[in-house]
Image: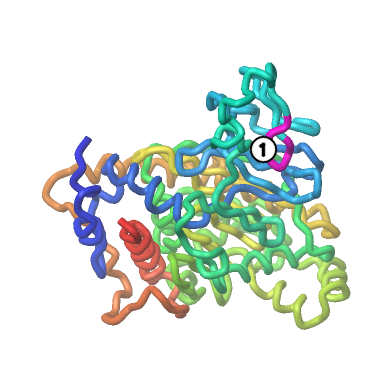
């Protein structure tokens, strides 16, 4: 394997300049391997939502930074995350995406068993291990937990490496976007609902994450979809109630000025909010009874603050993007330098009308499904860029739009909605953590 970057941390830092990045960030398999080790393992990644494992023994499996994990509801009601491997020979304890293991995990290979908190429970031929030192070595200690687990309002995050930032230090003020999403429930509780849409795209994960904060592309990339929708709706009265699909698709063609004025905000460590003033979700039809119930539950001030803020996208860098309205998230799971899994999940806001869940599910199908009228445009271009960047002559990708001297990555600052600082902020965070401890 080419070890150019592993042996030269300065070469990694040189890939991210003030207003451009090198194409190797998207193309290099060596860099991707280093990302798994130095970046994804050291920073906090979204593992899942606690509502996925409601009862003791419920589990779901994940792969994060190339490691197989399982998230389980423990006997005491807590949520634990462990490496999905038996301490004996390494066989995965469970291979289904989700299920219930009962009161313990049992390895299918040699029947070693473990409690829900990972502690060793029993093993066959126990007498054969007496005096062998098994109890004192790693194999006798039970399941290996990940180094860090943090649950914030039922959103479960993990840090795989022992060295890395504390949860609160890493996310800081961006966590308020989770508060905004959860507080849309009068019970202040969300539940995963409606299944998940998965799409494997043959592009680097950074391309997808950049696009979440790119508001200049919709007018050209999604022109055919918005023009078709506009043609269908053009003869309707201005005050005519819009069908849900029209309500959600028409704003994509709002124009450059609309997207520029919507505003954005950057946070340290690559996090961001797009649509701090308004967004394509701000004009959804109001539900007066629901809003009155929310004000009764949360108080007038908090309810108004929640209802008036519908950011287009909030990025908890690097693995999670949230939409408070509709209640939907995307999870970015890098698989290779040129392959990315994107998951779109919907939430039920407990105590809210079913229409809110319908909006979430409809939006995911309309915009994020592999067969949607929007996603196929994006996917085509992501995969086109992945191939096009192999062309010779220009090895750099421009991030010049909105650049000003003296930009910092360690502060919270406002931007316009079309400023590529939202993207530059992500790459600066990438460079920071790729160089930490290298």
Occupied quadrant, residue 219: bottom left
Image position, residue 182 (x, y; %): 72, 63
**Quick check: can you spot residue 406?**
yes
**Residue 358 visible in image:** no
Which residues, given as a range, are shown in magenta? 115-121
- The residue positioned 62% from the left and 22% from the top of the image is 129
Q: Residue at x 65, y 42 (%)?
A: 71
In the rendered image, residue 73 lying in the magenta stretch gets the answer no
Q: Tell me if residue 102 comes above or below residue 394 in the rendering.
A: above
Residue designated by label 1 = 60
Residue 304 drawn at (x, y percent): 74, 78
Count the marks: 1
Q: Which residue is drawn at 58% across and 34% down?
A: 84
Between 69 and 378, the one nearer to me in the picture: 69
Quadrant, the N terminus: top left
Q: Does the magenta stretch include residue 118?
A: yes
Quarter in which the C terminus is drawn: bottom left
Task: Tell me where residue 328 sits by quadrant.
Answer: bottom right
Q: Residue 290 location in percent, x, y?
A: 84, 66
Question: What residue is rendered at 54% in x and 55% in y?
Answer: 320
* Coloration mode: rainbow
Q: In this view, does 62 lie to the left or right of 40?
A: right
């Amino acid at each position: 394997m080419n070890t150019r970057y592993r042996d030269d941390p300065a070469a990694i830092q040189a890939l991210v300049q003030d207003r451009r990045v090198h194409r190797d960030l998207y193309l290099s398999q060596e860099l991707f391997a280093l990302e798994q080790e130095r970046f994804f393992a050291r920073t906090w990644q979204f593992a899942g939502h606690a509502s996925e494992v409601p009862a003791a023994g419920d589990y779901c499996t994940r792969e994060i930074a190339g490691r197989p994990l399982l998230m389980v509801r423990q006997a005491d009601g807590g949520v634990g995350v462990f490496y999905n491997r038996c301490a004996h020979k390494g066989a995965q304890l469970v291979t289904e995406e989700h299920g219930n293991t009962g009161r313990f995990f049992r390895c299918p290979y040699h029947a070693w068993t473990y409690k829900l908190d990972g502690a060793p429970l029993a093993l066959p031929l126990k007498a054969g291990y007496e005096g062998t030192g098994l109890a004192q070595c790693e194999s006798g200690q039970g399941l290996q937990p990940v180094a860090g687990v943090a649950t914030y309002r039922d959103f479960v995050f993990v840090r795989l490496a022992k060295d890395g930032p504390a949860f609160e230090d890493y996310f800081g003020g961006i966590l308020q976007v989770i508060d905004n999403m959860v507080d849309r429930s009068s019970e202040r509780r969300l539940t995963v609902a409606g299944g998940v849409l998965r799409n494997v795209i043959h592009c680097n994960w950074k391309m997808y994450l950049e696009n979440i904060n790119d508001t200049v592309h919709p007018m050209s990339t999604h022109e055919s979809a918005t023009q078709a929708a506009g043609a269908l709706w053009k003869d309707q009265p201005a005050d005519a109630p819009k069908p849900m699909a029209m309500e959600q698709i028409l704003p994509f063609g709002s124009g450059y000025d609309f997207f520029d004025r919507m505003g954005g905000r950057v946070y340290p460590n690559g996090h961001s909010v797009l649509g701090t003033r308004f967004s394509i979700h701000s004009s959804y039809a109001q539900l007066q009874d629901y809003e009155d119930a929310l004000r009764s539950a949360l108080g007038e001030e908090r309810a108004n603050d929640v209802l008036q803020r519908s950011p287009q996208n909030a990025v908890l860098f690097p693995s999670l993007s949230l939409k408070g309205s509709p209640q939907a998230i995307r999870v970015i799971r890098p698989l290779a330098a040129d392959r990315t899994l994107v998951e779109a999940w919907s939430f039920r806001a407990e105590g809210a009308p079913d229409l809110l869940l319908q909006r979430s599910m409809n939006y995911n199908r309309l915009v994020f499904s592999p067969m949607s009228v929007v996603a196929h445009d994006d996917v085509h271009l992501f995969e086109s860029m992945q191939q096009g960047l192999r062309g010779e002559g220009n090895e750099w990708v421009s991030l010049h739009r909105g650049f000003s001297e003296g930009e910092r990555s360690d502060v919270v600052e406002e931007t316009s909605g079309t400023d590529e600082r939202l993207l530059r902020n992500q790459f600066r965070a990438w460079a920071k953590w790729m160089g930490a401890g290298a």
